[in-house]
Image (cartoon, rainbow, N blue to C red):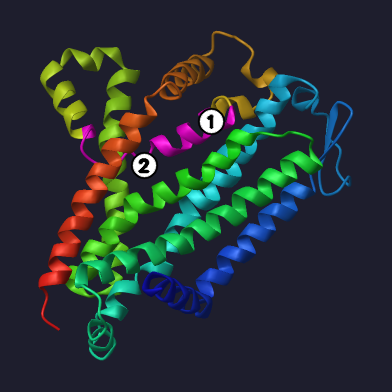
Amino acid sequence: MQLWALIVDGFREALDRKIFWVLVGITLLICVALLSIGFEGDHVSFMFGLWKPQTDHYNPAFELGRSHITGIVVYLAMDFFLGWVGVILMIIATASVFPTMMERGTIDVLLAKPMSRSKLFLYKYISSMVFVLLQATVFVVLTFLIMGLRWEVWVPGYLLCIPLLVLLFSYVYCVSVYVAVKTRSVVAAILLSLGAWVFFAMPKTAVDVFESFPDLQEHKTIYRAVRVVSWIPPKTADIPYLAARWSRAGTSLDIFPTSMMEANDSPAQMDMERAREMEAQQLKMNPAYSIGSSLLFEAVVLLLAMWSFARSDY
């Protein structure tokens, strides 16, 4: 009952914030845009049939066409909206949860209840995660139904994007919670958590650079050090690949028409082929390692935040 009361209270606070309705509006806007896309024989129409360009390579009657369609939703709509814009907006929407709770008057009332500080901390954290779960569920379920009912492309694995999006948010939000507990500042929680998100991606990017250019691997000491460092932070960059893998969306380059990917000897084509090979390797990653190591990092940060919250004077 205590957990439910905090979740309801958290939703009431979220509804009062304009960011919640901004997220709902963006979700509906993307859904309308996807609904405006239709398939007629071997053609794709846009804007509810007002524009019918020649798009033979996206014929949904073929498996490659289905991969194209799913890839567009996974790599463009989902990854951009909930993977970037959505996470940033949700970080902003939830950053004030702990600073507000720790204000004098509010914290005094909460601590007067028969509830330990550790339990209060966890319940508040869970209430924020439930808010994000709702947003992710609405977006993924609506786009899933659009793909199935409108395009006749049913991809059950796409529904696994719901927990993946919640995971992505949790990787960043744990830093926001820690900073909020230590500083009680909403601005600091937002800025440092977004900065941490960028930092989390840097080791993985460095490893990709080394693997893209084999000559760099001659510097074995640096290469090994970069790989070791990449094991520590949450694997935020893996989330889109896991979503694509379980949705069978192929690589991000598959969303381009086949005519653009025809083999030639141009440097740009060679770079695209190299990128495709690296992305194909990413799709074969071990999900248990990626998610497990990331959750371990998150658990350590949350335990530190909980310890600081339990020892603070109010």
Count of residue discs: 2
Q: Can residue 96 be seen in this view?
A: no
Position of 313 with respect to 234 (left or right) is left
113 vs 247, nearest the viewer: 113
Percent of width and height locating residue 28: 68, 60
Relative height, residue 198 to residue 257 (above, below): below
Position of 17 with respect to 55 (left or right) is left
Q: Mark 2 points at which residue?
A: 236
Residue at image coords 51%, 70%: 19
Q: Which amino acid does label 1 sit on?
A: Trp
64 vs 215, nearest the viewer: 64
Q: Which of marks 1 and 2 is in front?
A: 1
Magenta region includes residue 246: yes
144 vs 1, nearest the viewer: 1
Percent of width and height locating residue 278: 42, 20
Q: Name the residue under label 1.
A: 246
Asked if disc 1 and disc 2 are in contact, CB closer than 8 Å, the reply is no
Question: For mark 1, does the 10 Å Cα neighbourhood hold few (<14), some (14 to 19), or many (20 or more) residues?
Answer: some
Relative height, residue 203 to residue 79 (above, below): above
Specify the segment rendered in magenta. Answer: 230-249
Position of 144 with respect to 179 (left or right) is right
Residue at image coords 31%, 17%: 213
Quarter the N terminus occupies: bottom left
**Extreme residue toward the bottom, this view:** 105
Q: What residue type is labelled 2?
A: Thr
Please tell me in which quadrant of the rendered image residue 286 appears.
Answer: top left
Percent of width and height locating residue 14: 48, 74
286 vs 260, nearest the viewer: 286
Residue at image coords 46%, 24%: 283
Quarter the C terminus occupies: bottom left
**Cα gap from disc 1 to disc 2, whole angstroms:** 16 Å
